[in-house]
Image (cartoon, helix red, strand yellow):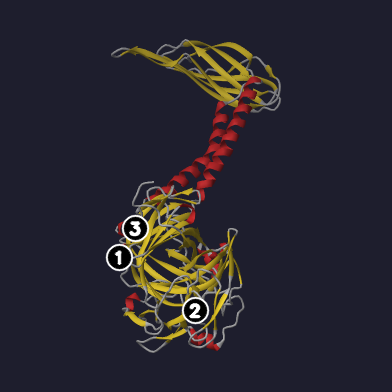
Amino acid sequence: MRQFDCPQCGAPVPFETPGAVFAVCQHCQSMVVRKDASVETIGKMADLPPDVTPLQIGARGDHNGRPFRLMGRLRVGWTDGTWNEWYADFGGDRYGWIAETQGFFMISEAAPVPPGFKFDKIAMLGPESSIAIGQDAYRKTDHKKTRVIAGEGELPFIAKPNDEWVGIDLVGPGRKFAGLESDGPETRFYLGLSAQPEEIAWEGLRPVPGWNGEPVPVEKRNTDAVGCPECGGVIQVKAAGLTQSLVCGHCGTLLDAKGSKVAVAQKIEAASRLEHPPLPLGTRGTLKGIEWEIIGCVKRRDQYSQWTEGLLYNPWHGFAWLTEWNGHWNYMRRVLESPDPMSPVFEGRRYKLFAREESMVVAVAGEFYWRVRIGEKSTVADYINPPRILSSEIYPELEEVTWSEGEYISGPEVGAAFGMKNLAFASGVYLNQPNPWATRAPTLSRYAWIATAALLIIQIVGMAGAGKKVVLNQDFTYEKPVAGAPPMPALVSPSFDLDGGQSPARVEAEAAVDNSWIGLDADLVNETTGQTYPADISVEYYHGYDDGNWTEGSQKAGSDIPGVPPGRYHLQLAPDADPALAKMPFHITLKRGGIFWSNFFLCLIAIWIWPLWAKIRNFSFEARRWSESDFTS
């Protein structure tokens, strides 16, 4: 480490990294430039604006076994926002940058500009354009002019307030990213990875007042409070240093907060003031294991519907969103890669395009990390893999595209997390709402197939052991009663025994009817108990010629009697016949045993009725879901 005395105040100014040529004196804010063995000052560095970041110079981090130490910081901004760029020592004479933006980190090191890379050519490409770097395909996600606001610590180049360059961000697979910067004559190139805050192991972070038990001193409140230039009301800023826009809670004016002083950005009509967000601003709750505070809410609409998006903030975890539509909620976080919009895959899940619409901001409340405006438009594409959702937002005017991924959560879960009761009940089917029948229907079908196989085995075994045995073969004759004479008495068979356990019996009749019929009311009578088992049989046969020969019916018929117990029986018959018949012999056969296929089919229906109902409900649910889509499923 080398240390020099500040030419302005004499305080020590350390230059710990060999590549550092510029530092800010922590005592007098002088910008100190190192020239070999001497230093000189080139003016005063602007004061850093209030910032609630837990990062500070000297803090150490480790990302995937790659340790680093923060050595300096630049506060940079553009038209619609600001962020921190931390200069980091990775050890072994390797240095790079940790960009702290929108609640996540971009970890990179300088690299040679790839052959054939022309800044002007890439600058002309639109958002989502594909660019090859090595073997990987990157997508252009951002393109903007950046300027220095302030800085501290040591840096590898001279960075004075208001210095400008143009930056282009490219996002590749597996959270890879590349950055291009040009200030005119020089082009700088960076390669790295993006990371969520919780994916970096930090040491030496500074405490954040008001979080994790840290007290909020009076002077801190004053630092993070701003006055509304429109009405003079005091506004408490929750995410100082990250907040770019905020709405005055007193007069509803939309304020620009990206600079050291707030300014009126847009006067909002009463209809565009979000007076009653679904979850009140300032509410804290624990969702997905992280404590969040609701600091902002946006109402958006497209040509079909409108919804709200609540902005969640935590100093150590950045930002997340809670979106709400008709009582349906989604927990959303920024995606650190750029999926292929033609066939998006994220974390191994493939998504289907559900909707693509132009949305517009219609009402706001609270504070935001970008410069929100009433009337702000973006093209939103939603891809689903219930209960997950993947969304892209393209801002044509900003040449920027962002991706977010989320999960459907229920209203009761949101209410429990934030201590809210009586949240609106969900109505309708939402685009990524879990289908309660999606897993139930296949599970029930699987069990139904198992039950069907078991039933079929039982039926086959039953058939093998239930052969039919003839226990009665008897001829009878029907005679038409003489007019005025009493009806023909019942015909009774000889007695016979039915052996074995309780099993079916079948009564069959055969008669030589010809264009006529004979009917039999048969009763199987248990001679011990007197119990009767009825069987109705109708033998009818017709034939003729009508544009061809035809026949109908048969000279044989039968009737099954289920569950007949063993015992001594006889068969009692009451015949009736076509009036044209004077006499008709017929033969009766009674068989014992066998099984009923009707029982098999009744059991089959009972097995499948619920799985089929589940399939119908599953289909109906998906049909209702996709009826709201711009695209077919």
Ranked by sequence position, the earlier of labels 1 and 2 is 2
Instruction: Give the x, y percent position of residue 609.
Output: 52, 40
Ranked by sequence position, the earlier of labels 3 and 1 is 3
Ranked by sequence position, the earlier of labels 2 and 3 is 2
Instruction: Give the x, y percent position of residue 507.
Output: 57, 19
Query: Furthest-front residue in view?
Result: 37
Q: Quadrant of the N terminus?
A: bottom right
Q: Identify the mark at residue 397; answer none if there is no mark.
A: 1
- Left or right, 590 with respect to 21, comes to right
- Check the image and report above or below for 297 versus 125: below
- Between marks 2 and 3 in the image, the one whose residue lies nearer the viewer: 2
Q: Nearer the viewer, residue 122 or 289?
A: 122
Q: Cα distance, mark 2 to mark 3? A: 46 Å
Instruction: Say what secondary structure mark 3 lies in.
Output: loop
Residue indicated by mark 3:
127
- Left or right, 140 with respect to 25, comes to left
Q: Cα distance, mark 3 to mark 1? A: 11 Å
- Check the image and report above or below for 48 versus 468: below
Instruction: Say what secondary structure mark 2 lies in.
Output: strand
Q: Nearer the viewer, residue 398 or 165?
A: 165
Q: Identify the mark at residue 38; answer none if there is no mark.
A: 2
- Left or right, 197 with respect to 162, comes to right
Q: Identify the mark at residue 120; answer none if there is no mark.
A: none
Question: Would you call the spot at circle 2 few (<14 residues within 10 Å), some (14-19), or many (20 or more)?
Answer: few
- Verify CB contact (< 8 Å) between mark 1 and mark 2: no
- Verify CB contact (< 8 Å) between mark 3 and mark 1: no
For badge 2, the amino acid type reads Ser
Instruction: Give the x, y percent position of residue 73.
Output: 49, 73
Tell me the residue at 44%/65% (across/down). Answer: 324
Instruction: Say what secondary structure mark 1 lies in.
Output: helix
